[in-house]
Image (spheres, rainbow, N blue to C red):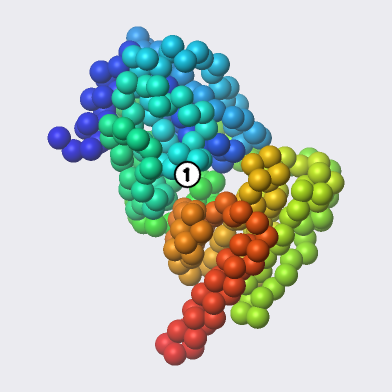
Amino acid sequence: MNIKSRIYEMIKAYDTIIIHRHSRPDMDAIGSQYGLALVIRDNFPSKTVYVVGDTNDMTYLSKMDDISNDTYHEALAIITDVSVTRMISDDRYLLAKDLIIIDHHQNDTDVPNVSIFYKEPTFASASEMIIDLIRTFKLKVTPEAATYLYGGMVTDTGRFLYLNDASKTFELASYITRFNPSVQAFYDYIYTEPLQKRLTKNLFSNFEITENYVAYRKNDAELIAKSGLEFQSVSRGMVNQMAGIKEIPIWANFTEDVENNVIVGEFRSRGITIVDIAKKYGGGGHNMACGASLKDWDEVDLIIKDLDERAKQYAKNTEQN
């Protein structure tokens, strides 16, 4: 039995299913988690399905459930879009009877006692993996579920900029749009913002440039407080303020997280693999869109140096070719 069939059979076997994803969720985390929950509820109405985790302005219209520890005892837990323990929101998945992880990142898992670890980095988003499961088993999809899954695809690919397998991604996008997702309403939610928030972004418009044209920003706690923005809006939300500049092949955003005593780095590139650098510092992600949690500003400087060296080597190889 292949891994997708094993997942499907395990879902069918459980009456209670609890779905997790990573903390400080992006739209792919929410899309894969909540989209999967809706699909299971619609296709197996006798099952009880919960979604748990912290919330932010990426949760769209979804609502997380408040459940007791006892709910896990005879339940199946599913974790989407993450496979490392330090990033999973709500560690009570450890109480579940069985555990499935569905993740498209390149990281291996350190989660104990995983029943099924479905890791497939050829997918550009976890939402794609859920759509692929839906298509494989011909499951019913409501427009609401389609909206979350399509939204996860759109945002995690940077509006189809970051693609691991373009034909696969567009094929799955075409498939999920058959179920009439609310595309315009979703776009309005994700890609419009209040005037004051747009003006606040001016606080993050400046950046530094290394010798080999790596752009980077350092956002300390004082600046975040001054902006009035939530952490995710600065950390992940501001990284692409440096994108789309011809001379800049790699850009990075470093944001101080005083609550967890780390500095969160978000790294992006145009055509250059940098995920190995993220992994060197305990992070991971995609080849050209990844991140890591760093212990201090000295470690930030080390990773900037590594990114600069990667840009230098890329420029050298490009000149030789």
Residue at x 41%, y 41% (from the top left corner): 83
Residue at x 77%, y 48% (from the top left corner): 221
Whole-percent x, y for residue 161 in the image: 51, 58
Residue at x 57%, y 25% (from the top left corner): 62
* Number of numbered labels in the structure image: 1
Whole-percent x, y for residue 273 in the image: 45, 67
Front residue of 132/210: it is: 210
39 lies left or right of 274: left
246 lies left or right of 139: right
Whole-percent x, y for residue 92 in the image: 46, 24
Vertical comparison of 240 with 233: above or below: below
Residue at x 68%, y 52% (from the top left corner): 255
Front residue of 79/174: it is: 79
5 lies left or right of 283: left
**SS type, badge 1:** helix
Front residue of 202/96: it is: 96
Q: Residues within 10 Å of mark 1 (few under 14, many from 20)?
A: many
Q: Is residue 184 visible in the rendered structure shown here?
A: no
Q: Is residue 286 visible in the rendered structure shown here?
A: yes
The quarter of the rendered structure image containing the C terminus is bottom left
The quarter of the rendered structure image containing the N terminus is top left
The residue sitting at the left extreme is 1
Vertical comparison of 165 with 125: above or below: below
Whole-percent x, y for residue 95 in the image: 40, 22
Q: Which residue is mark 1?
A: 153
Vertical comparison of 152 with 286: above or below: above
- Give the amino acid type for the residue marked by disc 1 in the picture: Met
- Name which quarter of the figure residue 244 lies in: bottom right
Vertical comparison of 46 with 56: above or below: above
